[in-house]
Image: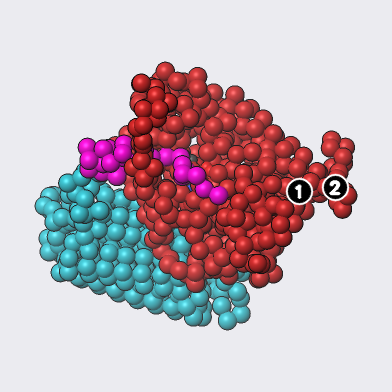
Amino acid sequence: MRTVDLNEAAVRDLNQALHDQSDECTERDWQVLNPKGAHNLACGLDQNLSVEIQGHAGYFCAGMNKKATVTIEGNVGQGVAENMMSGVVRVKGNASQAAGATAHGGLLVIEGDAGARCGISLKGADIVVKGNVGHMSCFMAQAGSLVVCGDAGDALGDSLYEVHIYVKGEVKSLGADCVKKEMRPEHLEELTELLNRAGIDEDPAAFTRYGSARQLYNFKVDNAAAY
Amino acid sequence: MTEEKYLNAGLRESATFDRTAMAEIRRAAQSGIYDIRGFGAKRRLPHFDDLLFLGASMSRYPLEGYRETCNTSVTLGTRYAKNPITIDIPVTIAGMSFGALSANAKEALGRGASAVGTTTTTGDGGMTPEERGQSTKLVYQYLPSRYGMNPDDLRKADAIEVVLGQGAKPGGGGMLLGQKITDRVAEMRTLPKGIDQRSACRHPDWTGPDDLAIKILELREITDWKVPIYIKVGATRTYYDVKLAVKAGADVIVVDGMQGGTAATQDVFIEHVGIPTLAAIPQAVQALQEMGMHREVQLIVSGGIRNGADVAKCMALGADAVAIGTAALIALGCNHPKYAEEFKKIGSAPGFYDDYQEGKDPAGISTQNPELAARLDPVEGGHHLANYLRVLTLEAQTLARACGKSDLRNLEPEDLVALTVESAAMARVPLAGTQWVPGQSF
Ligand SMILES: Cc1cc2nc3c(=O)[nH]c(=O)nc-3n(C[C@H](O)[C@H](O)[C@H](O)COP(=O)(O)O)c2cc1C
């Protein structure tokens, strides 16, 4: 295990050391001490590394992650795991806005709550939130899935495309073109697998599925009020 | 009756309700939806034609054409990037998406730009291998939609352009209508085939200049501070936008005036939002100068650039380089008269065609239809574009030498005068034959 103490090293040194592992991997297990909410920690990784951040992280933590497993033992700022391609990012605390924004692949687990716009423009990644999510979550989300074990805020799934949304608790309101959908066996199977991968013990049957009514896919005058 | 006879017979057309206005009212009444089209603003605007150069005379010394050198190369991204980009000519190819344009057109742009040592730019739709392969220097756009965005392509790019807006639609998102969404385009954008794609107008994971500063640091971290980071804005409150972009950490700022082209935008947006390119440049330069950043943070200007005079005028007003979109497409054959018959079939005509969003371009440029796209030979297209870029450069050099300048960037506002009061006020140069700069002196 290699330890980088951000009381001594700069974020640049940490990220460069982690990026150097893409060419030749000499150390798989990393620990980051004293992150103190610094931005852009462990972003742009491209190797099977395990990185544990011992504290709170700022914006864009694990941004554009590929392959690596990044665990944050605290809260994270805006855009955690934004545009992730693969790997796993796990937040032990809460996440601010735009968690997992535009992520194409991999798994993001938030053990606390997530703020507004969780999974905005999601493009294929899976997000599992143990707590609640804020308003406009999955706004314009294209693919992938969002699982919310708590409640969802206003305008869930506004203008969504083909993303799969599962919510156990209350949904304050649904956004444009987002509707409640039937939970078929394949969805229960998908949800069970997501919960298992996230290591969260919940009954899949207690969730409701939401998805796109596909009414806004092609511009129609009759829908003018929704635009 | 011919038009002349109408007039002689005393018939009078309204200047307010002219034929264009009437046709639009009829179109709206029929369809119930606003007009979406490509191209840039078509209305007349104060533009570079309203400026003239003062050549050398007794008080200035010209340089000998062909013999005395006039440098055209510019290095972009000197502020923070480990690997700034040097372009041999100060004309770059603006970002135009694969999706809006065919793969052949993108390849032709790459070939033409590379042949003369300049950059080309991806667009709202990701990076194609054809484009990367044929572009020796490629700028990768980072847009609100993040279609096709991935760290591998990011690291393959020679520069990153964070797009906040476009001159054709400052404050608006993108649009790609279902007709143009083929399997390949759909896959690159992770969306179902055949749907109308709306790209967001705001970035999904940051808002405002303070967030943008952190976003830029993230992009630098991911690319290990190697490549320059540009910020592109549509021209509106340019003075403030440029200051904020500098503060946010840009290496290069791209300002796109309201004449700038687009692939698909509401006509009302294209014609009624933003400020002319001419008005934007002095605002941008003033902002950079006040921050002590003129030439430290390079300024690229676009929107309506057609010839070497336009290039030279942009540079005289303080730009470090320009970018072209529409003109590059025309060099490839967009709107070519040889397709007159085919334009007629789709209700258009050479010189008028702007329905890029429909994907039926007879010239095979703004289309995803394989048969149409095959009409554009990327090698030949690249050759034409390279020729055109060489002409732009030679023309700009001719004008610079006439003003006694051994480097295009030595051109200065003092070399210019304006033909109209409006252009004098916007460009902040005197009305020809006077000392008068409206707004600055009386
Ligand atoms: C067909 C087409 C597609 C475009 N696509 C994009 C795009 O994806 N991203 C972007 O920032 N600008 C886009 N633009 C705008 C250009 O980058 C550029 O700002 C503009 O074309 C410059 O003005 P000009 O066309 O008068 O040269 C597009 C323009 C055209 C004509």
Residue B162 vertical placement versus A32 (above, below):
above
Inspect the image, locate mark 1, and give the three-letter code of the amino acid beneath it. Leu
Range of magenta residues: B20-46
Percent position of residue B182, x then y: 35, 33
Q: Determine the colour of chain A.
A: cyan
Residue B136, horizontal then vertical, whole percent: 64, 40
Q: Residue at x 58, y 48 (%)?
A: B47
**Type of the residue with mark 2:** Ser
Across and down, in percent, residue B151 comes to: 50, 53
Q: Is residue B413 left or right of residue B239?
A: right
Q: Residue at x 47, y 78 (%)?
A: A37
Whether residue B155 is visible here, answered yes or no, is: no
Disc 1 versus disc 2: distance between alpha carbons?
A: 9 Å
Beta carbon of the mark 2 residue lies under 8 A of ligand 1: no
Question: Is the residue at mark 1 from the same chain as the one at mark 2?
Answer: yes
Q: Nearer the viewer, residue B372 or B227?
A: B372
Mark 1 neighbour density, 10 Å: few (under 14) some (14–19) many (20 or more): some
User: Under tag 2, what secondary structure?
Assistant: loop
Asked whether B43 falls inside the magenta stretch, the response is yes
**Chain B in the picture: what colour?**
red
Q: How many marks?
A: 2
Q: Quadrant of the C terminus of chain B?
A: bottom right
